Every structure is written in C-alpha cells, then in structure tokens.
C-alpha cells in the first residue's frame, strides 16, 4: 500500500514539472553596452518561442511575460545580437558588444584646433573683417540721422568686396579644418587597417559634410567610416581618385 502511495506521489510530482515550465511569469531586465557599461534604449527584444517582439525604454529597462526556458534575443543597430534563456529568477541582463571599434578621443597638444586657426586668421586679417562688415547704413550724429559714408563705402568699394571674398575663404577653410580635425587618416587607419597612404585616399573619397561632422559623435564617425569601408573594399579601384596637383603660385614681374 505504501509503495502505491509513493508511486502516486512521484507521478504527481512528475506531472507538475511540465506545468511549472509551461506557466508564464513576469520577466524583467536591462540592456547594457558591454564596453561603456551604459544602458542602451530602443533595443529590440524577441521571444524565439512565441515570436513576440517588444522594445525597451530609454532607461534600458524592459518587462514581459515568458516561460522558463524561453530564448530571448536582444538586437540593436550597431551592436552584435545576444541571446539569453529565462530562468526561475525572471531577470535578464544583456551586455551587447558594439560591431564597430570604439576609439577614445585623442587630444594632440601640438596640433591647433580649427577654432584656434580661425581666431589667428581673424587677428591677422582684422582689416579685411572690418572692411567686409556692412555696418549700419544709417547713422545718428549731433545734427541728426543720416547715411553712413563708411557703410556705403563698405557696400560698393572694390577693397571691401575683396575683403569679403577673403573672409568668405577663411570661413570655408575653417569648415574644412573642422572636418579634417575629426575625420583623420589616423582614425581611418585604426578602424579599417588601411595604411596611412590608403587612408588618405579613403579620406578624399568619402569626405563627409561639415554639418555631419558638427553633429556626429565619435561613435557615429567611427560607424560612418566602417560603412564606407564596407563599400570601398568591394571594389577599391572603382573609387580611385588622383590627388589634386600642388600649384605653386609665382608672381610675374
């Protein structure tokens, strides 16, 4: 009789095990960047058994219903996907690894920043900036309001027009320096493995815009280089561009 009782109890326990695994429970978790340990938001999370897809919040947190043993995949642009299994704790901590190489910002003390170069140019060509400015066409003096002779001169004189062309060139050079300062051949070489000579050619071909560089983070610049390199290595000869010749201007007497 006791034997039958034990057999019945054992059978009941075995029958409950599948029910435990089939029962859904609340699962919570957080997604981190594996390198920086910062939380990642807007990550796509998919339950491979049910096909259910959710996104975590801006704090990197998420919660959903799942069964013990369910496989959950975390996916985010710029990261390798990762898969974890739901256990009885109901806690999933994802640590995603970036696809691209993260490169810390390097400060080069011997290299002048674009802002320093622009400031020096404005000091050197202070007269051009003074002449190139339009100023107020109307002025107010002791005898009343009237036209400003200096402003009218700045509008129409040849010297003022040349000054404005010079200041425009200085401003354009500043924008190019901003791009060069962040989109360097050293960075390109480190991300792609290209030699400095090849990296310089790559930099001419895939030169980004001033406004992109102004808004982009270090991560985004690195990802931009990687995306361009994926296209470049398919057919490097297709993108070959000869460098512009160096012109030495000589004054002819």
Image (cartoon, helix red, strand yellow):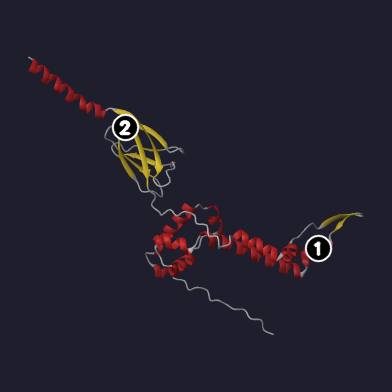
Q: Quadrant of residue 74?
A: top left
Q: Residue at x 61, y 62 (%)?
A: 174
The N terminus: image quadrant: top left
Q: Is residue 225 left or right of residue 249?
A: left
Q: Would you name the residue on which mark 1 appears?
A: 152
The C terminus: image quadrant: bottom right
Q: Residues within 10 Å of mark 1 (few under 14, many from 20)?
A: some
Q: Residue at x 72, y 66 (%)?
A: 128
Tag 1 near tag 2, CB within 8 Å: no
Q: Residue at x 8, y 15 (%)?
A: 2
Q: Position of residue 19 (x, y in %)?
A: 23, 26
Q: Would you name the residue on which mark 2 appears?
A: 66
Give the SS element for disc 2.
strand
Marks 1 and 2 sit apart, C-alpha to C-alpha, by 77 Å
Q: Residues within 10 Å of mark 2 (few under 14, many from 20)?
A: many
Q: Nearer the viewer, residue 124 or 132?
A: 124
Q: Position of residue 4 (x, y in %)?
A: 8, 17
Q: Residue at x 37, y 45 (%)?
A: 96
Of pointers 1 and 2, the one earlier in the residue sequence: 2
Tag on residue 228? none
**Residue that sits furthest to the top in the current view:** 1
* Figure disc tally: 2
Q: Position of residue 123 (x, y in %)?
A: 70, 63
**Residue that sits furthest to the bottom in the current view:** 253
Q: Quadrant of residue 47?
A: top left
**Residue that sits furthest to the front in the current view:** 109
Q: Is residue 33 left or right of residue 163?
A: left
């Amino acid at each position: 009789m006791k034997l039958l009782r034990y057999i019945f109890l054992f059978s009941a326990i075995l029958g409950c095990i599948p029910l435990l695994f089939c029962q859904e429970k609340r699962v919570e978790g957080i997604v981190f960047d594996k390198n920086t340990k910062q939380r990642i938001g807007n990550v796509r999370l998919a339950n491979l058994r049910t096909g259910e897809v959710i996104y975590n919040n801006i704090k990197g947190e998420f919660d959903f219903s799942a069964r013990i043993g369910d496989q959950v995949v975390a996916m985010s642009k710029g990261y390798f996907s990762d898969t974890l299994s739901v256990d009885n704790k109901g806690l999933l901590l994802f640590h995603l690894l970036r696809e691209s190489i993260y490169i810390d910002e390097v400060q080069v003390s011997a290299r002048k920043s674009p802002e320093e170069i622009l400031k020096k140019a404005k000091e050197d060509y202070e007269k051009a900036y003074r002449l190139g400015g339009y100023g107020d066409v109307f002025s107010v003096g002791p005898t009343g309001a009237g036209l400003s002779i200096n402003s009218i001169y700045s509008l129409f004189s040849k010297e003022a027009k040349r000054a404005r062309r010079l200041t425009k060139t200085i401003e354009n050079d500043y924008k190019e320096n901003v791009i060069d300062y962040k989109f360097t051949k050293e960075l390109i070489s480190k991300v792609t493995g290209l030699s400095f000579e090849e990296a310089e050619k790559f930099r001419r071909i895939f030169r980004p815009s001033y406004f992109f560089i102004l808004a982009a983070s270090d991560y985004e610049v690195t990802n931009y280089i990687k995306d361009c390199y994926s296209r470049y290595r398919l057919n490097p000869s297709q993108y070959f561009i000869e460098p512009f010749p160096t012109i030495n201007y000589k004054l002819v007497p």
